[in-house]
Amino acid sequence: MKSILMDSKECLVCGSPHVEVHHVMFGPDRKNADKYGLTVYLCPEHHRGPEGPHHNKPFDIALKRLAQRTFLETHTQEEWMALFMRNYL
């Protein structure tokens, strides 16, 4: 599914056109992240580098908050909790 968090396929941080898909929710939640478009585009440095969400907890949580806020524009909090079982707001 197309990302519901971004319109363009450029790095969310720096605007680079060389991007990778980052699934905001991972592990067992990755399938639902894909299903509901909870992905962002990040260049390799901002995806896997020291400031990327895999190594930077505040950035990871900020992306999860963005995902939840955007999801709640078209779904309920109850649906979010049933799918992801954690409130990030």
Image (tube, grey):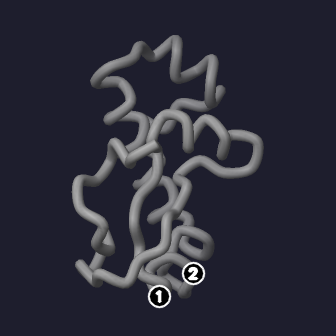
In the image, is residue 56 above or below residue 17?
A: above
Q: Which quarter of the figure has residue 59?
A: bottom left
Can the viewer see residue 54? yes
Image spot of residue 3 (x, y percent): 38, 48
- Separation of marks 1 and 2 at Cα, in angstroms: 6 Å
Image spot of residue 60 (x, y percent): 51, 60
Amino acid bearing label 2: Arg
Q: Which residue is mark 1?
A: 45
Query: Is 78 on the left or on the right of 89, as rendered?
Result: right
Residue depicted at 55% across the width and 35% down the height: 35
Q: Which quarter of the figure has residue 72?
A: top left
Image spot of residue 8 (x, y percent): 24, 62
Residue depicted at 32% across the width and 47% down the height: 5
Q: Which quarter of the figure has residue 31?
A: top right
Q: Which residue is mark 2?
A: 48
Helix, strand or loop at mark 1: helix
Helix, strand or loop at mark 2: helix
**Label 2 crowding class (10 Å Cα cut-off): few <14, some 14-19, many 20+?**
some
In the image, is residue 42 above or below residue 58?
A: below
Residue depicted at 74% across the width and 49% down the height: 27
In the image, is residue 6 above or below residue 9?
A: above
Query: Is 80 on the left or on the right of 75, as rendered?
Result: right
In the image, is residue 77 above or below residue 17?
A: above
Q: Are marks 1 and 2 in contact (CB under 8 Å)?
A: yes
